[in-house]
Image (cartoon, rainbow, N blue to C red):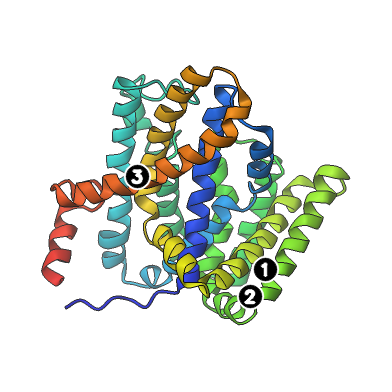
């Protein structure tokens, strides 16, 4: 029998938080396009902008630490090949969906030109970008392994600040995101172990202190305009990480909550790759029924989030049972996993 790695429940909970925040964000974008987005929800989602992807990439960096230390051959054949495979499969799936089934209201050009299936390898323009970014982050981290870690992170942090602050003019959002978020993956990979220990030991201090700092930074930037945008974004992300990670530790001590959120954290992939297609269809259908009544969004937005997450997980379960598991795992690897089990 293959032995499973020991998992840290609160890290799964934190990753689960990140995917829920991402689904909420995309759901509200489609609601906003159809003019049925509640202003309160949109404001709350906007406040969480500095936390969503930094949380995901920091936890991903921590979880990737052992893979980055593997020999290059194993690293490329196991980790990077998996990401390349998933990026190809799901970018193609999205292209087909928005070409034949529904126009993407937010990115109408998606699915309009087969050339996009080639261009995506250097200039992705869809929600699948995070898989592409993870591959870049992992290779870059491994290449930097012999460099001075503190110096590398300081440089990555400076690039992040310059990009967040729009001092570096980069048109495509995916290219900007790579420069903005690499520092979080790098830090999680190299220093995650010690930070995880600190947060686990002092969750209340981290949660409460992180929240207070995050709230203070929000006040300084958006109410008083007293802090530069790039520095604000990076420091707010760090404060938000402390807040939500500390909260995740506290949540892990409540068994029903731990099981529910940790499950999301262990199954982020199927939600990330399919929820946009589901949400776009649902919100378009809802918009035709309620017209431009934003008040209805107070009910429909949470409903779409729940259905999009649940249906994404259900699609994964059906795929596994119907022989379509190759959508999530390369066939050769799936065969090896079955033999090992």
From the viewer's perspective, tell me whether residue 259 is left or right of residue 210. Answer: left
Q: Is residue 271 above or below residue 284?
A: below
Along the viewing direction, whichever of 105 and 148 lies nearer the viewer: 105
- Mark 3: which secondary structure? helix
Dot 2 and dot 3 residues touching (CB under 8 Å): no
- Mark 1: which secondary structure? helix
Label drawn at residue 312: 3
Q: Position of residue 196 (x, y in %)?
A: 55, 75
Q: Position of residue 215 (x, y in %)?
A: 77, 56
Number of numbered discs: 3
Q: Residue at x 61, y 62 (%)?
A: 244
Q: Residue at x 42, y 36 (%)?
A: 276
Q: Is residue 108 above or below residue 75?
A: above
Q: Earlier in the sequence, mark 2 or mark 3?
A: 2
From the viewer's perspective, tell me whether residue 143 is left or right of residue 170. Answer: left
Instruction: Give the crowd class for mark 1: few <14, some 14-19, many >=20 residues within 10 Å.
Output: many
Q: Position of residue 226 (x, y in %)?
A: 87, 48
Q: Is residue 65 above or below residue 167?
A: below
Q: Earlier in the sequence, mark 3 or mark 1?
A: 1
Label drawn at residue 143: none
Q: CA distance from mark 2 to mark 1?
A: 6 Å
Residue of label 1: 207
């Amino acid at each position: 029998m293959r032995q499973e790695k020991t998992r840290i429940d609160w890290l799964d909970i934190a990753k689960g938080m990140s995917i829920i925040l991402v689904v909420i964000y995309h759901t509200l974008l489609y609601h906003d396009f159809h003019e049925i987005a509640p202003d309160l929800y949109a404001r709350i989602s906007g406040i969480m902008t500095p936390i969503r992807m930094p949380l995901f990439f920091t936890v991903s960096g921590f979880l990737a630490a052992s893979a980055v230390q593997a020999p290059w051959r194993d690293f490329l054949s196991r980790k990077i090949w998996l990401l390349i495979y998933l990026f190809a499969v799901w970018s193609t799936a999205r292209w087909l969906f928005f070409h034949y089934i529904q126009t993407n209201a937010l990115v109408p050009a998606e699915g309009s030109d087969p050339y996009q299936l080639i261009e995506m390898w250097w200039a992705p323009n869809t929600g699948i970008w995070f898989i592409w970014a993870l591959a870049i982050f992992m290779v870059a981290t491994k290449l930097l392994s012999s460099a001075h870690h503190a110096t590398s992170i300081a440089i990555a942090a400076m690039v992040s600040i310059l990009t967040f602050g729009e001092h570096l003019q980069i048109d495509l959002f995916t290219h900007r995101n790579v420069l903005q978020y690499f520092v979080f993956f790098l830090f999680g990979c190299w220093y995650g172990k010690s930070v995880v220990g600190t947060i686990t030991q002092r969750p209340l201090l981290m949660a409460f202190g992180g929240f207070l700092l995050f709230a203070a930074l929000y006040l300084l930037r958006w109410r008083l305009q007293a802090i530069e945008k790039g520095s604000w974004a990076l420091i707010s992300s760090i404060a938000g990480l402390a807040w939500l990670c500390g909260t995740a530790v506290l949540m892990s001590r409540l068994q029903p909550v731990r099981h529910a959120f940790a499950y999301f954290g262990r199954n982020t992939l199927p939600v990330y790759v399919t929820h946009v297609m589901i949400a776009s269809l649902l919100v378009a259908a809802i918009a035709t029924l309620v017209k431009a009544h934003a008040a209805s969004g107070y009910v429909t937005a949470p409903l779409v989030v729940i259905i999009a997450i649940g249906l994404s997980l259900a699609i994964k379960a059906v795929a596994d049972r119907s022989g379509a598991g190759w959508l999530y795992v390369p066939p050769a690897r799936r065969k090896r996993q079955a033999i090992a089990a």
